[in-house]
Amino acid sequence: MRTYPTDDIHHDLRVYFICGSTNVSRPLPTILREAISGGITMFQFREKGTNSLTGDKKLALATQLQAICQEHHIPFIINDDVNLAVKLHADGVHVGQDDESAAAVREKIGKDKILGVSANTLADAKQAIKDGATYIGTGPMYETSSKDDADEVCGPERIKEFRQSGLTIPIVAIGGITAENIPPILAAGANGVSVISAIAKAPSPAEVATKFQKTINDRT
């Protein structure tokens, strides 16, 4: 079982690719390999929505994606499905406010695994910290079409609010992010950005990932 050094999370959140089979028009393992070659630093398997895989098919894809991540030393996170994460000894789990409670998830996965929690209010963020979150995700920063259930756009101002309130937990931003609109997000205090469509639907996931990585490197 891998133990996860807390200090690593600041690096791993920089270019955080989130994807499931419903987000792509080509095989997801192929896209993941291309994104890794371009410089993504973490991957989250988020299998949700219409026509998403379940059961053995979901397990088979998750196993394949995890093997690719392990081959390239990229943390492999599973969205919401705690039982699958435990079964595969995934590097961590990410949960939203409508999923299983973060405290319960932390209890199930142990103290050495990554626990990401979506937090859209200061109260949510403080509770996530209390429950043992490794990092929090917040957004959407900008308009996005990747998630059917996306909340109202909050912009980088929410990250600034969290930081000004004294929160030091690593924060990753999500929602409508492109290489061009990253600078205000970093300036507000984010440690990195998480993206779905920008990489998943790109003609060249590698090129887009490289552009994200370069933009962040130039400003940190």
Image: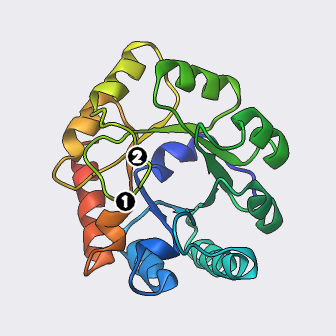
Q: How far is the residue under mark 2 from the one under mark 1?
A: 8 Å
* Amino acid, disc 1: Ser
Question: In the rendered structure, are the residues bearing label 2 and label 1 in contact, judged by CB atoms less than 8 Å apart?
Answer: yes
Examine the rendered structure and indicate whether residue 163 appears above or below residue 13: above
State the residue in front, 127 or 147: 147
Tell me the residue that label 1 is attached to: 146
Left or right, 86 with respect to 185, comes to right
What residue sits 62% from the left and 76% below the top?
A: 53
Q: How is the image coloured?
A: rainbow
Examine the rendered structure and indicate whether residue 51 appears above or below residue 25: above
State the residue in front, 60 or 211: 60
| Element under disc 1 | loop
In the rendered image, residue 111, in percent from the top left (x then y), is placed at 78, 40
What residue sits 54% from the left and 25% below the top?
A: 125
Q: Quadrant of the C terminus?
A: top left
Tell me the residue that label 2 is attached to: 150
